[in-house]
Each structure stands twice: as structure tokens, then as C-alpha cells.
Amino acid sequence: DGGITQSPKYLFRKEGQNVTLSCEQNLNHDAMYWYRQDPGQGLRLIYYSQIVNDFQKGDIAEGYSVSREKKESFPLTVTSAQKNPTAFYLCASRGQGRYSNQPQHFGDGTRLSIL
Amino acid sequence: KQEVTQIPAALSVPEGENLVLNCSFTDSAIYNLQWFRQDPGKGLTSLLLIQSSQREQTSGRLNASLDKSSGRSTLYIAASQPGDSATYLCAVQGGSEKLVFGKGTKLTVNP
């Protein structure tokens, strides 16, 4: 079945450590996104990528980095500069065309906590 | 700056009841509006997408309407079931790739 796979499901970060969250899709989608979800808040966009080797900052990019070397993969690194990383991280993808009116498809998320 | 508000934040109904969830947005210059469902600890599942030129979309027991000029959308759920219990999120897309999300309505359907 086509879909989006996020791993790991749970992740723990030590102080000063960088961690990388994996997102892989087999939907042949061009656009991919990373969101952060905190209790009582809506989803907030961290980074997004519309094509391979290109990505843009979202609303809360500070302390995060991404790469898009392959169409299928869009890993997110939470760096030590992100002082409040505890959250639920969601990856999404969408089919071709900025105005294609296709819905975003989401993975099942990674929950990141600080040790 | 686009803002999306969902009222109520939580709703509890008995099984079989018809119900309406509300979503409002401040900037009517949207490209589409989407309704999602989120189960606890899970990602979002797309339910309905309404293009800006459309007034409503239907899928099974779900019907979503859009009044762009007044900045409002409603999600109507007919004959609610315990399996409908989840958080429902609406999101609007403007002139960019970004979706702006509301904080959601947590629905509980009691058997």
C-alpha cells in the first residue's frame, strides 16, 4: 500500500544532541512537509519542499534542518539549538502542482522527548 | 495573517445524533479548505477538501460546506457513531504551499 512512513515512533534526546527523524513516502508525491504539534495548539509548519534539492522554511524553522536528496525522503534534524524540542512531529506529502487541490497525506508521527 | 478558529474545542454527544463542527478563517482569499480527522497518537487523515469555487463536498455520512465570503465552513456528521470519536481539524490553503490549521474540535460519541 502507498503511504508515508515515519520512524522512529518514539525518540529521546539528550541535552546538546542532534537527532534525525525519518520520513519516507512511496506515493510519488513532489511536495513534502514537516509539522510540529504541541498540546492545545494547531499544527505549525517547520519546513517544506516542493521538489528534490529544494526546500523552504516554514513558520518555526529555527533549530531545525532538512534535506531533500531523493523524492521519496525528507529527513528532519532537530539540532541542539532547538531548546524546546518536546513535541509530536508529523510529516506529510502532496501530489504535483502548487495549485493541484490535492489533500496532504500524513504519516503517523514521531513523538520526541528530552531525557 | 490568516487565522483559523474552531468552535467548540470539545463536544460530547450520544450515539445517533447529527452534529455540526464549525471552522472560521479571517482571510477569505483561500485556495481550498480541508477537513482532517486525528485519532489519539496518530497522524491526520484527510476527510474532505473543498475548492474555493465549490460550496460543499460530501463523503458518506460527512458533508462539508464552505462560505468563503463570510469566512466559514461547517462539517456535518450524520447519525454519529462511537467510531467517529476523534479530533477534527480544519485547515485553509492560501496563495502558498502552507496550510494554516485550527486547533481542532475533540468529538466524543457516547454509546
Image (spheres, coloured by chain):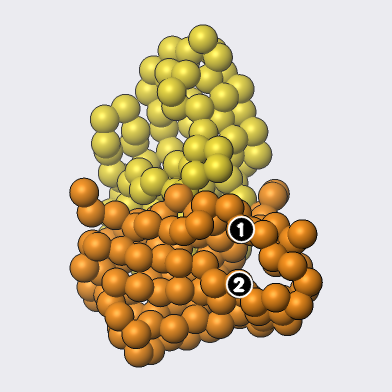
Chain colours: A orange, B yellow
Q: Quadrant of residue A75?
A: bottom left
Q: Which residue is identified by label 2? A: A19
Q: Is residue A71 above or below residue A85?
A: below
Q: Nearer the viewer, residue B6 or A104?
A: A104
Which residue: 46% across, 58% down?
A: A7
Q: Is residue A10 left or right of residue A67?
A: right
Instruction: Return the chain for callout 1.
Output: A
Q: Is residue B87 above or below residue A41?
A: above
* Mark closest to the chain's N terminus, 1 or 2: 1
Q: Is residue A83 left or right of residue B13?
A: right
Name the secondary structure under disc 1. strand
Q: Is residue B31 left or right of residue B26?
A: left
Which residue: 30% across, 80% down?
A: A70
Q: Which residue is identified by label 1? A: A11
Where is residue B94 shown, x and y percent of the image? 43, 71
Q: Quadrant of residue B3?
A: bottom right
CA distance for labels 1 and 2: 8 Å
Q: Quadrant of the C terminus of chain A?
A: bottom right
Name which residue type carries label 2. Val
Name which residue type carries label 1. Leu
Q: Nearer the viewer, residue B77 or B87?
A: B87
Instruction: Return the chain for callout 2.
Output: A
Which residue: 78% across, 72% down?
A: A15
Q: Are marks 1 and 2 in contact (CB under 8 Å)?
A: yes
Q: Residues within 10 Å of mark 1 (few under 14, many from 20)?
A: some
